[in-house]
Every structure is written in C-alpha cells, then in structure tokens.
C-alpha cells in the first residue's frame, strides 16, 4: 500500500510566503528609514546647533559689550580725568552710576592698584589680581573671569582712565552674574540639553549647575578619563568653531563650540543624542503597525486565492491516493475554476478512464491465458508508455505459445532420446577414466604456473620500489627546476636594475659632456688663464665619452643576457613540463604496477581455487563411473515422464 506522507499544504505555503514577503519589505523599509532618519537627524542637529551656538555666543558678547561700554563711558568722563575735580565729585559720579546700573561695586584705583574712591564694598587693592595685570599689559579694557565673592558670583571689568598716554586711574566695576546666568538658563536645547562657558584654562564660567562655577571646577577634573572630550576642549581653546558627536558620561551627545569674542571665553552646547531616538522609535512603531496591517491584508488575500487553488488540488490528491490503492472505477470530481487546477482535474479524469480501459483489456486477455487459451492478444489501442505494456503482454503470450509448441515437440522426441541415454552412460564411464588421467596432468601444470606467478609477483614488487624511487627523484628535479626558474626571475629583476643603472650612467655621461663643453667655452673665454682648465675639460669630455660608450656596451650585453635568460626560462619551463609529464607517466606506471600486483595476487588465489576445484573434479570423476551405471535404470523412468509431459502440453491451444 502506498505510504501517504504529510507535508505542509499549498495554502499554508502561499500564506506563509505572502506574510514573509511583506515582513521582508517591512524590515528593509524600516532599515532604510532608520538610516535616512539618522542621517537627517545629524544634518538637522548640525544645521540647528551651528547658528544656535553662534547666536548664544553673540548674546554673551553683546551683554559683555554693554557692560564694557558702561565702563568705557565712565573712563572717558571729564570729571574723572580733571585734575582739579575733587574726590567728592568723582565719588558722586561713581555713586550715581552704581545706583542706576546693577553694579555690585564700582571704584577708582590709583595706578599702583590702591583704592582711591568708590562704593563701600569695593576691594582695598587690586594690585595682585589678573585684572590689574591685564590692564597694565594691554593698556585697555579687560574682562576678568567670574569670581565668587561676598557669597555671590560677579563679573569684574576694568579699564584705565587716561589723559593722553598717562594712566591717571583704573576704573573697575563688578556686575552681578545674572548677565551670564540669564543666557545659560534661558538657552533651552531639547529636554536635557544645556550650555556652558569655559575660559582658556578650562575653568567653567557659566553652567546650569551653579556649584561648578562657584567652585571654579575645571573641565579636566569634571571629565577626567574622557580623552575624546578633553581633546575637543583643546581644539576649542584654539578658537575653532565646530560640532562633534561623542560620549559624555557614557551617553552619546552632540557638542557644539565657538569662542566668545571680547573675553577669553568659549561657548559650548551639549545636546543628548537620545532625545532624537523618539522620532526613530515613532517611525519604527508606525512602520511595524503598517507591516502588521499589510500582513493581515496579505493573509486575507492569500487565503482567498489559496483556497481556490488548494480545493481542486486536494480533490486530485485524494483521487490519486485511491488510484494508488487500486481503485480505478471511482469518478473524478472536476471543479469549474477556469484555471490550471481545472485542467489538472480534467487530465486526471482522462488518465483514470484510460487506465481503467487498459486494465480491463489486460484482465480479459490474462483470464484467457489462465484458461490455457494462448490464441488471444491485446487488440485495444494503447498510448504513451502503456504501449510498452501492451507489447510486453502480447510478447509474453506469443512467447508462451511458441514455448508450448516447442515443449510439445520436445516431449515427442524425449522418449526416443531416453533410449540413447543408456548407450551414452557406458561412454561416460570410459570418458571418466580418461578424465582422471587428464586431471593429474592438469595438477602438475597448475603447480608450475603457481611457481611462475610467485616469480612475477616478486618482480612486480621490485618494479614498484624502483618506480617509487623514480617518482621521488622526479619530485626533487621539479623542485630544483622551480628554484632555477625563481633564480632566473631574480636575474631578470637584477638585469632590470642594471639597465636602470646603465641608463643613469648614460645620463651622467651626457651631463658630464655638456659640463665639459661649457667648461671648454669658459676656458676659451678666459684666454691664457683658462688653458689648464681647458685641458682638464677635454679630459673630462673624453672620460664622459668613454663612460657613454661603456654604458652602451653594457646595455648591449644586458640585452643579450636578457635574451639568453628568456631562452633559458623558456627551456626551463619546457623541461619542467616534460618532468611533470614524466612524473605523471611514472605515477601511471606505479598504478599499472599496483594493478599488476593485485592481478598476480588474484591469480594466485585463483590457482589455489583451481587446485581445490581439480581435486573436486577428481572426486567427481570417480563418482561419474558409478553414476553412469545408475543412469540406465533411470532411463525407463524418464521415458514414462516424457509420455506424461506430452499428454499435458497437448491440452494448450496455441496459434498455428
């Protein structure tokens, strides 16, 4: 019975393929979309941060410029420069300015940095500050770093008050830190982005975390171990403006930086990269939802069309299974699908009908054969491979009919042949005696052949050993030939280098000749003073000519050597090919020798078998004599059986 194996249905395969196709497209589009979003995000962030960083820096520059302008305007006040103005008048100007502007303190200092006049909370001396040193060195306005004094952060700005080139005073004012804090605090970059201002020494001047500013935290301490970020700060100190992506505190961030003009400060903006992942996540989720919807739609469509395909195929499969179990009478259901599945059902219907017709025809003919009627043949028109079945059946019937005829004829002659068997049995006895003598001679010749085979076996083994040694020598020769070819390649390489050197010598000879000619000309111009030099020039020119001739002669020799090397390489290659061919022939001889050894061993085994067979034949020959005596008694029984066989075959009806 046909074994029915269970496979996945076509319907399941179609649905699975459709869903897999949609998922592959979804995965591909998601990957492309993520890549494009990443590129777009980087581009947008860079386009956003560059102007934002510059605007923030310019805002700080503008605020510092306003503060500096106030100090500069005070330094240009005539009252402060007037030597006749009293201390009270100068102090009144400072007090009035302080009350109108958010100064923490504002004071005048003498050229040696001592307090002259100003508000009460002003320092008594500034001679040890970097601000004072900067004003002395530059002779101009200086913006000092942020200072934490009197429990608050301050920005100190100072400028010399001059009368001509003479410094009369230094006017110094301290502003509240709000001018920087407002810029840093109001600069919102995403959800967690922030801005910071750093001076040239790496000290934080402004930061959302005020403790960094109060403690004068240095970025080298804050970001210790982050070499990539520290290198970025080094680039920032050079005045460079740029945007970089790197990790800060283990998180990937965009860092944009630019210098703050008017002060030795630098603006840095930090924007976490993870804030932009939300856009990617939303895109991925939406794409996954679209993919799921597409999978659902593809499943519905694939289910509909696969049902139209799987139904007829299922009917065809069931009918073929019945046909495999011997059912040739059940009808085939044909569904009107108007496609290839309908053609498949119709083809199966026609196939079952034809098979049923052929089997019925064969059954009728074989039933006739079972009734001992050999006169009928298969007459129905068979097609395709069934023609072979028809012809085989007819051939069997015809052959059986002819065989029965021959058996009938043989049965008639068998009885007469039995009489002659007795006479033949006596002849067998005489032949058995002669056979025994022949067997003895056969044993002697077999022994001689066995000795010869042993000698052939020893010679074949010696031949194999010699062939193996020849193969080893050929392998060594091939190795030496490869080394020879390699050496010739090295010689050719050296010849190329010598050619370059010769060319270089020709160039030197040519240049030397030109120099000698020029020297001769100059010697001729020098007159008597240049005669000795002219002789030297002629000798140099002769030497250059000889060098040129020698270089040309060397070139010819190298060309001849190159030709000889090429010929040698060609001959060596041909020799290598010949040696390889000889090696292959040697391997073939080895193979033949191996086969000869196998054949000799087989012959030795065969001779042993022949010896046993001859001994058995000898035993059989002795028995034949006894058998021949018994044959006469069997002839009578054989005659009776021949008559019975003749009667049996006469019952068959054969063709004439």
Image (spheres, rainbow, N blue to C red):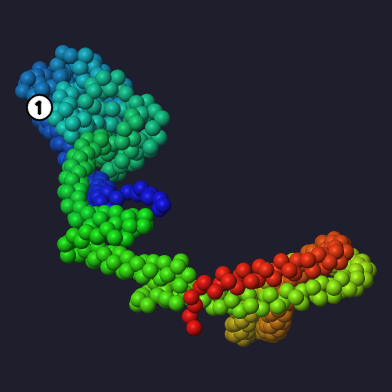
Q: Is residue 654 left or right of residue 590?
A: left
Of residues 165 and 632, the one drawn nearer to the viewer in this rendering: 632
Of residues 271 and 578, the one drawn nearer to the viewer in this rendering: 578
Q: Which quadrant would residue 496 be assigned to in this image?
A: bottom right
Residue ID at (23%, 27%): 206
Q: Is residue 517 above or below residue 283?
A: below
Q: Which quadrant would residue 438 be assigned to in this image?
A: bottom right
Q: Position of residue 463 (x, y in %)?
A: 85, 68
Q: Position of residue 345 (x, y in %)?
A: 25, 63
Residue ID at (31%, 41%): 245
Residue ID at (87%, 74%): 431
Q: Which residue is denoted by mark 1 in the rendering?
A: 79
Q: Position of residue 394 (x, y in %)?
A: 45, 75
Q: Residues within 10 Å of mark 1 (few under 14, many from 20)?
A: some
Q: Is residue 53 above or below residue 393?
A: above
Q: Is residue 10 visible?
A: yes
Q: How many marks?
A: 1
Q: Is residue 279 visible?
A: no
Of residues 392 and 333, the one drawn nearer to the viewer in this rendering: 392
Q: Which quadrant would residue 271 be assigned to in this image?
A: top left
Q: Is residue 532 left or right of residue 1?
A: right
Q: Is residue 239 above or below residue 427?
A: above
Q: What is the secondary structure assignment of the residue under circle 1?
A: helix
Residue ID at (36%, 57%): 326
């Amino acid at each position: 019975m046909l074994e029915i194996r269970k496979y996945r249905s076509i319907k399941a395969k179609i649905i699975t393929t459709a869903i897999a196709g949609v998922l592959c497209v979804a995965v591909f589009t998601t990957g492309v979309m993520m890549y494009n979003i990443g590129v777009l995000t980087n581009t947008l962030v860079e386009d956003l941060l560059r102007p934002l960083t510059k605007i923030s820096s310019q805002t700080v520059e503008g605020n510092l410029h306003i503060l500096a302008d106030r100090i500069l305007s005070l330094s240009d006040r005539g009252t402060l420069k007037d030597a006749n103005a009293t201390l009270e008048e100068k102090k009144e100007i400072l007090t009035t300015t302080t009350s109108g502007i958010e100064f923490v303190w504002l004071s005048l200092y003498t050229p040696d940095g001592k307090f002259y006049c100003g508000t009460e909370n002003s320092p008594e001396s500034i001679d040890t500050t970097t601000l004072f040193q900067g004003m002395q060195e530059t002779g101009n306005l200086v913006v000092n770093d942020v200072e934490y004094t009197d429990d608050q952060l301050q920005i100190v700005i100072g400028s010399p008050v001059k009368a001509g080139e003479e410094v009369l005073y230094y006017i110094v004012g301290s502003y509240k830190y709000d001018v920087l804090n407002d810029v840093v605090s109001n600069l919102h970059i995403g959800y967690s982005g922030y801005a910071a201002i750093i001076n040239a020494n790496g000290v934080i001047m402004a930061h959302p975390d005020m403790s960094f500013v109060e403690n004068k935290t240095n970025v080298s301490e804050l970001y210790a171990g982050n070499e990539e970020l520290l290198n970025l700060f080094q680039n920032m100190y050079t005045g460079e403006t740029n945007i970089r992506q790197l990790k800060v505190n283990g998180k990937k961030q965009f860092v944009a930086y630019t210098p703050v003009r008017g002060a030795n400060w630098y603006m840095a903006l930090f924007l976490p990269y993870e804030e932009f992942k939300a856009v990617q996540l939303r895109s991925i989720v939406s794409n996954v939802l679209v993919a799921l919807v597409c999978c659902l739609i593809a499943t519905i469509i694939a289910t509909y069309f696969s049902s139209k395909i799987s139904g007829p195929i299922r009917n065809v499969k069931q009918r073929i299974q019945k046909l495999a179990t011997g059912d040739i009478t059940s009808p085939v259901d044909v569904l009107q699908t108007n496609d290839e599945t309908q053609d498949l059902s119709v083809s199966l219907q026609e196939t079952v009908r034809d098979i049923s017709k052929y089997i019925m025809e064969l059954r009728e003919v074989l039933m006739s054969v079972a009734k001992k009627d050999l006169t009928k043949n298969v007459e129905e028109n068979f097609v395709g491979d069934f023609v072979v079945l028809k012809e085989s059946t007819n051939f069997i019937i015809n052959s059986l009919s002819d065989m029965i005829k021959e058996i009938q004829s043989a049965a008639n002659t068998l009885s007469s042949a039995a009489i002659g068997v007795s006479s033949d049995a006596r002849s067998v006895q005489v032949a058995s005696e002669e056979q025994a003598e022949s067997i003895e001679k056969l044993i002697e010749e077999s022994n001689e052949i066995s000795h010869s085979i042993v000698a052939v076996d020893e010679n074949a083994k010696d031949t194999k050993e010699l062939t193996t040694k020849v193969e080893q020598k050929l392998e060594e020769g091939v190795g030496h030939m490869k080394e020879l070819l390699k050496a010739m390649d090295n010689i050719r390489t050296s010849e190329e280098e010598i050619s370059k050197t010769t060319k270089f010598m020709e160039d030197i000879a040519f240049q030397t000749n030109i120099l000698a000619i020029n020297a001769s000309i100059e010697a001729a111009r020098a007159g008597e003073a240049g005669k000795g030099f002219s002789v030297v020039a002629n000798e140099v020119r002769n030497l250059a000519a000889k060098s040129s001739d020698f270089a040309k002669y060397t070139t010819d020799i190298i060309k001849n050597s190159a030709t000889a090397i090429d010929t040698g390489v060609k001959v060596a290659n041909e020799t290598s090919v010949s040696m390889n061919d000889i090696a292959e022939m040697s391997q073939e001889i080895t193979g033949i020798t191996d086969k000869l050894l196998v054949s000799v061993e087989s012959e030795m085994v065969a001779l042993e078998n022949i010896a046993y067979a001859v001994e058995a034949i000898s035993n059989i020959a002795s028995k034949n004599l006894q058998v021949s005596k018994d044959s006469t008694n069997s002839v009578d029984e054989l005659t009776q059986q021949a008559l019975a066989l003749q009667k049996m075959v006469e019952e068959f009806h054969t063709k004439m």
